[in-house]
Image (cartoon, grey):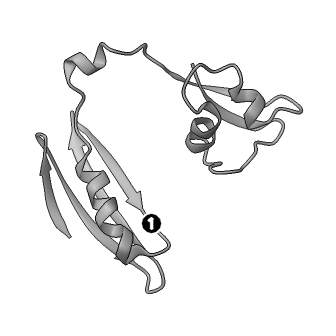
Amino acid sequence: GKELEQAGLKGYTAVASNGTESRRLATLDFNRLSYRFEGKAENFAVSDPELVSIIESFRPMAPRERQTGKPRSIHYVQVPRGATMATLAAGLRIPDAEAQLRLINGLYPRGEPRTGDWIKMIR
């Protein structure tokens, strides 16, 4: 592993392996919070530099970036009968809403919620 120091943040990254599968792990500390990253790929040796690059791109938002967009929040909702990710995403005004919902709910790329499940919705 190696220590990370970027954009005023300190952290650590390393590779964890069980012999058959490897993962890139990292943690970065910011404002008394620790942000954890975990990445894996089919061909880990080829993809690991890209995973490290993604981790190294993490930084605090600049003040002017915070002012540019409308704030969004996450709410939990219970999935109604017959709903799909497509129908749930239809009313959201965010880019690629269906993929975003799948991602934050652990259903990416093609999973569907079941009736009665509690899922995260972006508002």
- Among all residues in the image, which is located at the extreme bottom? 19
Classify residue 93 as left or right of residue 14.
right
Q: Is residue 77 left or right of residue 26?
A: right
Q: Is residue 33 above or below residue 63?
A: below
In this picture, residue 36 sits left or right of residue 30: right
Tell me how many marks there are.
1
Which residue is more in the foreground, 122 or 48? 48
Q: Could you say where residue 118 lies in the image, as x and y percent from the top left?
A: 70, 35
* Quadrant housing the N terminus: bottom left
The residue that appears at 26% across and 43% down in the rendered structure is 58
Quarter of the image where one finds residue 115: top right
Vertical placement of residue 122 versus 110, above or below: above
Residue hosting label 1: 40
Which of the 4 image quadrants contains residue 37?
bottom left
Q: Quadrant of the C terminus?
A: top right
Q: Residue at x 61, y 40 (%)?
A: 99
> Please, is residue 22 above or below residue 117 in the view?
below
The image quadrant of residue 24 is bottom left
Image spot of residue 10 (x, y percent): 14, 48
Q: Residue at x 57, y 44 (%)?
A: 103
Going 68% across and 28% down the picture, which residue do you hit? 89
Q: Residues within 10 Å of mark 1 (few under 14, many from 20)?
A: some
Q: Is residue 122 above or below residue 60?
A: above
The x, y position of residue 67, in whole percent, is 30, 13
| Residue 80 location (% of width, % of height) | 83, 28
| Amino acid bearing label 1 | Lys
Q: SS for tag 1?
A: loop
